[in-house]
Image: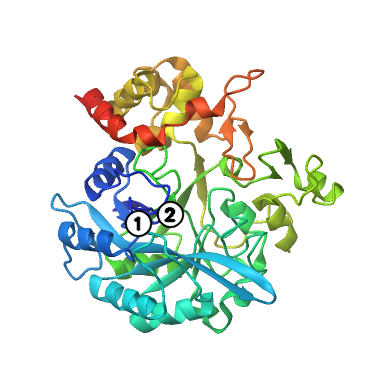
Amino acid sequence: MQVINDFHIHSRFSRACSKDLTIENLGKYARIKGLNLLGTGDFTHPLWLKELKEKLTEDGSGILRTKDGFPFILSSEVSSIYSEGKKVRRVHNLILSPDFESVERINDVLVRRGANLKSDGRPIFGIPCPELVEIVKSADKRNEVIPAHAWTPWFSLFGSKSGFDSVKECYQDQARHIFALETGLSSDPAMNWRLSQLDGMALVSNSDCHSYWPWRMGREANVFEMKDMTYGEFIGIMKSRDGGKFLFTIEVNPEYGKYHLDGHRNCGVVMEPREAVKSGKICPKCRRPLTLGVLHRVGELADRPPGYVPKGAIPFKSLMPLSEIIAGIMESPVISKTVWGKYNALIRAFGSEFEVLLTAGTNDLAAVVEDKIAKAITDAREGRIKMQPGFDGEYGYPVFHEGRQRDYKKFEPNPGGQKNLLDFRASLSQ
């Protein structure tokens, strides 16, 4: 069976996350999106772990299920901040685990090492990456560590502000356990293929979502062909990089990501890497160092030209969240009744968002929504939509109407209104 999975998410116990992130909402909206396996996120947080134990059932497979059968895999993101090589390092890592017993062992060691797991669903501690891997693998050899959003400037393995130049430099003697890398929203596999040091690694994609809304959850995902859906099979597919089982990843255009180009958001300055180099990597307005984006950083570390494809590379498909396509065409916020009405009509017709985005034909789509929306969906599938690139923490966005500057904030949901939006969304489904 084909399993579309997103195993990097967060709970309501992580900072800047929706207070309505519950197991019930995650399962409900994962089905609407078309996901059929989800990470739990945040298993290091005591209250979320308690809730996971209450609402998910173990059966020995390493896949946990809700009462209505939706599958989850135990996952969590942690933040290591420490000094090494006369530089402050800030690296986020994903941890995967097969059962609650293994999770408890990880958490116990982290607490003994001084980590305050109650402070945040994404805990911060001073444990260097090699020691973190050793802790995780010592708790249970089946536990795994994957570098999270590996190119983000501020908090990642290769980050321009606080990262390293190689996997080996970061993880040292524990690098042998690092078999996969999360590319993040601001890069795609093609950018990562330019680094020969990554040839032996699986490139995975996840949403790192802070809410359960379908324009966030599953915006990046992995597509596996699985026989039994077990934890061991899940890890084995990534480790083997077997193209018959690891079918493809789902990506957003990397220009959509918040850190693709160089710039200063507060100054309204955005630059391509060549421009940034000419400026001495200094903002022309405030004269402070620019935040160098992922495209720049990949270019610094790459030892291959753009367009290089390694033998056996897992393919990828670039998509765009359906809500954002509709919102952009209709020039209406993603939370508006207009957008949800058209979104729901498509879901009723085709079953899930991924069915709409990946397989539905233009004529079939046009039987449900306006021709301009149907065309935009297939244009997005074929990579024919221009993007305004993201930079320095500002998301990129699709340009559907040439010559008109979009007020991006108008298209963003109001975080403070998400509880009421849940009631509003439910009313539209009735």
Q: Is residue 135 visible?
A: yes
Q: Residues within 10 Å of mark 2 (few under 14, many from 20)?
A: some
Instruction: Tell me which amino acid carries mark 1.
Output: Glu
Q: Residue at x 53, y 57 (%)?
A: 149
Q: Residue at x 39, y 65 (%)?
A: 237
Residue 231 against residue 328 in the figure, above or below: below
Q: CA distance from mark 2 to mark 1?
A: 7 Å
> In x, y percent, where is residue 310?
62, 61
Labels 2 and 1 touching (C-beta < 8 A): yes
Q: Nearer the viewer, residue 393 or 164?
A: 393
Q: Which label sits on residue 247? A: 2
> In x, y percent, where is residue 331?
50, 19
Give the residue pinned by disc 1: 225
Rendering quarter of residue 272: top right
Q: Residue at x 35, y 43 (%)?
A: 18
> In x, y percent, where is residue 255?
61, 41
Q: Nearer the viewer, residue 108 or 187?
A: 108
Image quarter where the C terminus lies is: top left
Drawn side of residue 202 relative to residue 384, left or right: left
Residue 230 against residue 72 in the figure, above or below: below
Q: Residues within 10 Å of mark 1 (few under 14, many from 20)?
A: some
Q: Secondary structure at mark 2?
A: strand
Rendering quarter of residue 258: top right
Q: Is residue 229 visible?
A: no
Q: Residue at x 57, y 33 (%)?
A: 397
Instruction: Tell me which amino acid carries mark 2.
Output: Leu
Q: Nearer the viewer, residue 74 or 197?
A: 74
> In x, y percent, where is residue 191?
64, 53
Q: How many marks?
A: 2
Q: Secondary structure at mark 1?
A: strand
Drawn side of residue 316 relative to residue 245, left or right: right
